[in-house]
Amino acid sequence: MNIDAQCGRYFKYRCFIECGPTWKRTKIDNRPAREETYAAMRELSAKILDPVVERFGPIELTFAFVSPALDREIRKSPPANTSRAGDQHAGCELNSTGRPYCKRLGISCDFKAERVGSRIVAAWIAAKTEFDRLYWYGDSRPIHVSIGPDNSRIVWSAPYSGGHRALFSQSDVFENLPHA
């Protein structure tokens, strides 16, 4: 796959592959091995990221696809807050036994909108798009969003004071937001 090819209106595959501080430091080969991962990147772009850019303006991907090689590099510098089995940053890649690293498949990315706080963008995503998981960590922090076969629309929030994630319904997290 040509990583300079467009996977959406505003993103190339390279945006998902060459992303995040560890990749920027190591420049490791982080290309997916499976076409299904590239297809998930196209779907995430089309169904979530492109509409977000059209509504709110430019966004910056801060973390996206993580190959096994990049995951090893990330784990060398704690805190390594990724989970190959639990998050969709591994895309649709398979482990050494031929099973998906994450059984939910799809793919995830973390991003920030350049002109709008994360809370408004997260509320809009929750109301207007199909997604699997949406993690909101605070208004000035990146949003984590994934897409996958289930698109279960689960929203997690990490309140500033608690320091841990708590599951809330979409209306609990976003009830008092301005309608964007």
Image: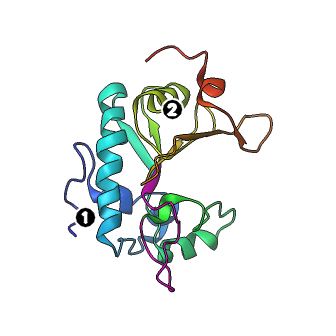
Compared with 74, 13 (above or below) is above
- For label 2, the residue is 122
Q: CA distance from mark 2 to mark 1?
A: 28 Å
Colouring scheme, one of rainbow, by chain, secondary structure, one colour: rainbow
List x then y, in percent, for residue 8. Answer: 24, 47
User: Residue pushed farthest bottom?
Assistant: 97
- For label 1, the residue is 3
Type of amino acid at the residue the image marks with label 1:
Ile
Type of amino acid at the residue the image marks with label 2:
Ala
In terms of secondary structure, where does tag 1 sit? loop
Compared with 153, 31 (above or below) is below
User: Which one is in front, 164 or 79?
Assistant: 164
Q: Nearer the viewer, mark 2 or mark 1?
A: 2
List x then y, in percent, for residue 104. Answer: 50, 60
In terms of secondary structure, where does tag 2 sit? helix
Residues rendered magenta in the picture: 92-109
Residue 13 visible? The answer is: yes
Quadrant housing residue 9: top left
